[in-house]
Image (cartoon, coloured by chain):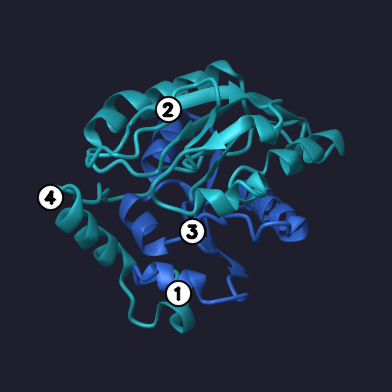
Chain colours: A cyan, B blue
Amino acid sequence: MIDRAMELAGVDFARIERDHVRRNLYPDFAWVAYDAFSPVNPPRVPLNEARVGFVTTAGAHLSAQPPFDTDADEGDPSYRAFPSTTPLHEIVLTHGGYNTGLASEDKNVVLPLDHLRALASEGWIGAVGPTVYATMGYVADTEPFIRETAPEIARRLVEDRVDLVLLAPT
Amino acid sequence: MGLLQRACDDAGLPTISITQVAEITAIIKPSRALFVAHAFGLTFGAVGDAVTQRAVLDAMLDVAVTMTRPGIVDSGFAWTSDDLRARQLRKRR
């Protein structure tokens, strides 16, 4: 277990966040707990041949796509998909849980597409997967997310024939 | 994040995620997670800090190819420029 005493110093954020959500938003909230780690799927190809997909919970979407619902107490289990070639200035961040105004000044802080595309052009990775998948990190009612959203994104990543998936929270 | 990663793991896809709160990831237990102690909303680094943003991405790729057993690895990245992360962890503005 990671424990950097200098910064956590007795702060149990999992409990603080759970209690905050229960008290203010969704009384039935609980972390979904698993007994064992998912197995590691080994790399399929060397990195310089790998098609790398990217998934973010930053609430990213195109301006033409509907924004995520930041008002729903149960959260928003939906997702958006957009081409990985999209310039960052065409991407909007809608999320109630972090400072999207600050991140919008340099979207690479949550969605490092400029760097990922550079890695491909420099030959460190084979290619960027064709589509970025984005959710909004606050999903207190996890049932529809587990039943529909997560398997659908995974299925689409398989269809995209990616060799590796990078997932980044906010 | 962890729930989505588990779905990708179940689909047979090699995955690597960033976790900013290791104790939550330890509950959900996806396959490979890299602990990055940056402020929420600044996952890859500060605004304009392209060097750190790229370094975090590089670290993800490195761990993706070197980590053979499931778990959480500490990247060593920390948020030192101000007390934003400390306040976020305590739900203080």
- Which circle marks residue B86 in the picture? 1
Mark 1–mark 2 distance (CA, rounded to whole Å): 30 Å
Residue drawn at x 58%, y 54% as measured from the top left: A102
Residue type at tag 1: Ala
Q: Is mark 1 in CB contact (under 8 Å) with mark 3? A: no
Tags 3 and 4 on a common chain: no
> According to the image, label 3 marks what residue?
B40
Q: Is residue A150 above or below residue B89?
A: above
Q: Return the chain for callout 3.
A: B
Q: What element carries label 4?
A: loop
Residue type at tag 4: Pro
Q: Residues within 10 Å of mark 4 (few under 14, many from 20)?
A: some
In percent of width and height, residue A35 lies at: 26, 51
Q: Is mark 3 on a helix, strand or loop?
A: loop
Mark 3–mark 4 distance (CA, rounded to whole Å): 24 Å
Q: Return the chain for callout 1.
A: B
> According to the image, label 2 marks what residue?
A79
**Which comes sooner in the sequence, label 1 or label 3?**
3
Q: Residues within 10 Å of mark 1 (few under 14, many from 20)?
A: some
